[in-house]
Amino acid sequence: MLAIFLHNYIQSTMFVDVLQKWPQNTAPKNTPQDNLKERAMKDTPPLRWQLLPLVAVVTLLSTLAQADDSVLSIKHANDGMASSDDGHFTSGFELNWTFQPEAQSWTQRLATALPDSLIGSADMAAFRLVHQIYTPNNIEQRGLIEDDRPYAGIVYGGISLYEDVPMGNWRQATDLHLDIGLVGPSSLADSIQREVHRITESDRPSGWDNQLGDEAIVNVAMRRQWWYSSPLMGKQFVHGPSVSAALGNLYTYASAGYSVRWGDEAPSIPTLTPSPGSRYHMTGKEGWQWYLFASVDGYYMAQNLTLDGNTFRNSHSVDRKEWVGDVSAGLALAWEDWQVTYAAVQRSREFDGQEEQDKFGSITLSKRF
């Protein structure tokens, strides 16, 4: 748990450093012969920059306190939460602010400008910041590991729109996402992982000189879900199918899945499994509330930048599998306006030569205002 906390803290504090060092990080990196410790120290942000995320969060909280029906969520994902391995999807940090847009807000105007077949209006909207780290399984090897996935760091920000429409005994939920960011050294993924492993005295990552180069990313995604609710053993049982698609140089895919949830009621919720930025939050009753959830999803992957390598330059890549599946399950606990959610995911092999399926977990802390 200490390692997870440190990883989460360092990853969040370096968001500001990514913006501060963006121009200089596009310059060529040091050679493999450079001392790794010196590079890690040089890339560590000064104290004043480490405090900026805390100031930003406090400012955001004061703003949220004046907003109606808004939720702030912080999510940390790590392979160590569901497996003893340290590789492939290594970690992720996500900060989401979900709010109910006003009738004349630009987010609402954006929703109404889109075709009704996509979304009619925005019941909720969200902004998010995301940072993710991918590595091969053997992070101590300095040389290129040709038959394992590339080193890659990703940072991006995005906006999401959510709509929830009743359809008789069913409800239809739609999520739209637009994300813009970058992959490559400017994400500072190498510095983050080195610093965390130095503090926790874990294996030293030595192969980051082989990571994907800097490349801007733009991605759009849509998910539509239908769900049916009925009482079961004194609780609410919700289930239904979903379809989704994404287009961009980060991911391009089509998918279908099915989800179930059982527990205390959570009305007017546009997703079955909790997703940061969605309205999947408890009702705020006094005392404890809880629910269990599970889902299965199948993907046809036409593009995955973290496996296919850079689009416009030569880089390390592996042969991506076109068909990928996810199985996930978890538990959510809430006390009044606070909620914590744990989810575990098992993913099928994503590329040729991958020895085992990947497992990772996530913890999401949410506060409703």
Image (spheres, grey):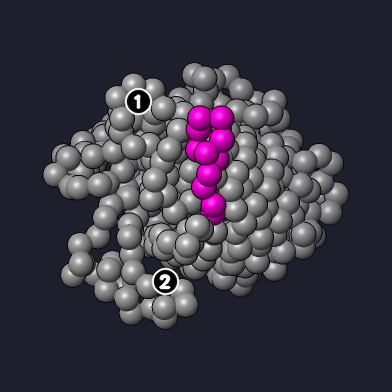
Helix, strand or loop at disc 2?
loop
Magenta-drawn stretch contains 232: yes
Classify 104 as above or below 235: below
Q: Main secondary structure of the magenta part?
A: strand
Q: Is 25 or 250 nearer to us in this picture? A: 250
Classify 194 as above or below 123: above
Residue 227 is drawn in which quadrant?
bottom right
Crowd tier of the residue under label 2, counting other residues whose Cα lies within 10 Å: few below 14, some 14–19, many 20 or above: many
Q: Quadrant of the C terminus?
A: top left
Q: Is residue 23 visible?
A: no
Image location of residue 335, percent across then percent down = 35, 25
Residue sitting at 30 percent across and 33 percent down? 284
Q: Which residue is mark 2?
A: 119
Residue sitting at 53 percent across and 63 percent down? 224
Magenta-drawn stretch contains 258: no
Give the side of residue 265 with respect to residue 250, left or right.
left
Image location of residue 8, percent across then percent down = 45, 32
Crowd tier of the residue under label 1, counting other residues whose Cα lies within 10 Å: few below 14, some 14–19, many 20 or above: some
Residue sitting at 44 percent across and 54 percent down? 270
Q: CA distance from mark 2 to mark 1?
A: 32 Å
Residue sitting at 66 percent across and 62 percent down? 255
Q: Which mark is residue 335?
A: 1
Give the side of residue 139 with respect to residue 63, left or right.
right
Identity, as a three-letter code, of the amino acid under mark 2: Ile
> What are the residue bounds of the magenta stretch?
227-237
Q: Is 20 or 69 nearer to us in this picture? A: 69
Of pointers 2 and 1, the one earlier in the residue sequence = 2
Helix, strand or loop at disc 1?
strand
Give the side of residue 324 with respect to residue 362, left or right.
right
